[in-house]
Amino acid sequence: MEYGYRKIWTITYPVLISLLMQQLLGITDTAFLGRVGEVELGASALGGIFYLVIYMVGFGFSVGAEIIMGRRNGEGDYPAIGNIFAHGVVFLLGLGLFMFAFSQLFAPAILDAAISSDAVYRATMDYTRWRVYGFFFSFVAIMFRAFYMAVTKTSILTVNSIVMVGCNVVLNWVLIFGKLGFPAMGIAGAAIASCISELVSMVFFIVYTRLRFDHGRYGIMKRRPVRWSVQKEILKVSSWTMIQFFASCGTWMFFFIAIEHLGERSLAISNLVRNVSALLYLFVSAYATTGGAMVSNLMGQGKPQEVMPLCWRIIKMCAVFTLPLILFTAAFPQLVLRIYTDNAGLITSSVPSLEIMLGAYVLAIPAYVYFLAISGTGNTRVTFWIELAILVVYVAYTWYTAILRHADISIVWIAESIYVGLLLVICLGYMRYGPWREKKI
């Protein structure tokens, strides 16, 4: 057995800790801004999702590159990994520059057209105009993350994330509230803190890789001429994940814009529920992401018969960690929500939506494991079409409940259960009967 429970945990726990630390970036922003005001709390959600929609285009590219690097690692072709890494960094820096310019030119018009509240719009722009500087740093950092995931050397991800989050917590306190002689910048301070933290993360990866990692084996610090043939190889896989992640996060932004039309209170509720959801999702994401990397390596080793047993082991391990958290949150919802805000009325109003979101995670555990396993086999075109089909249903339900019917916010959140339920049925069916075993990349 190539990947038993011990090996799965050895690779997963650094990923889990790194995702936890990264999630704390959003949690600390929410926790600090939740004590500034409901407008700032809701605006940070919209601004953060706007940033995330663009960020996920770059992340989608890194996922495609990770799949190829994982396959080459399984084949033992280590120099090819460094070549893919170098071309990925060049591509993502160019993409970051383009996305920064796009955001500066078009974000005001896009957000003004989408947001009905003037107060929320102004606060969202205060956040966004600073937050987009993070593209230059985060896009390079995600390529390092893809490399370490592909070669299953994930322990550095933990240390990097701890450094990044520690920096963000201190800077949030200083810049949002105006400590240590700095002016109180409010929501803009939260955005600046996140950007500086991403810069620190990028520098940490570069220094560690050069000084402490055997980079010569892979040649990832070696200068190389940029060749279109290599970029084409990466884009053949990653173009589908780029579009997929953009569509997925774009739909998530539509979800929050639709909710904003229900009022500032509904938007604030959804930001709280989103943050609790994200805390649970990081456990699911850690195991599913690790599973995708392992599947890629197994396919490179010519062992497709081990993929389904691996997925089942990962599902069981993920459930052991996630279900107790779901049950605890369901039993003590107000205690959990109090982490993010001290507004008693907002906490009480958030409980129904929170309970509905928790129910979706029972299905989300196997759904995401199988979904990323399909990506790990290299069938990124299949995952794109699966996601697109489900997102059409997701958008239709959100539009009907939030915009057409103006339903209670808890009813709108049922969209998450619909999404993961369809994802599970389709992905499980494809893994059982689809032609993924012969995929070559």
Image: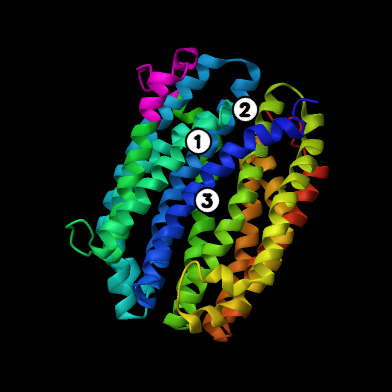
State the separation of the CA atoms marked 3 and 1: 22 Å
Amino acid at pointer 3: Phe
Along the viewing direction, whichever of 184 and 148 lies nearer the viewer: 184
Numbered mark located on residue 136 in the image: none
Which secondary structure, mark 3?
A: helix
Q: Residue at x 45, y 26 (%)?
A: 85
Residue 342 placement: quadrant: bottom left
Count of marks placed on residues? 3
Vertical comparison of 374 with 324: above or below: above
Q: Residue at x 62, y 25 (%)?
A: 71
Closer to viewer: mark 2 or mark 1 = 1
Q: Residue at x 64, y 18 (%)?
A: 75
Amino acid at pointer 1: Leu
Badge 3 or badge 2: first in the primary sequence: 3
Q: Residue at x 60, y 21 (%)?
A: 73
- Tell me the residue that label 2 is attached to: 441
Residue 317 placement: quadrant: top right
Q: Is residue 102 magenta?
A: no
Closer to viewer: mark 3 or mark 1 = 1
Query: Dot 3: within a 10 Å radius of its alpha carbon, few (fewer than 14), some, or many (20 or more) residues?
Result: many
Which secondary structure, mark 2?
A: loop
State the separation of the CA atoms marked 2 and 1: 27 Å
Q: Quadrant of the N terminus?
A: top right
Q: How is the image coloured?
A: rainbow
Q: Quadrant of the C terminus?
A: top right
Residue 313: % across, % down:
78, 40
Along the viewing direction, whichever of 376 and 183 lies nearer the viewer: 183
- Tell me the residue that label 3 is attached to: 245
Q: Which residues are magenta?
A: 205-229
Q: Is residue 388 left or right of residue 59?
A: right
Residue 391: % across, % down:
60, 62
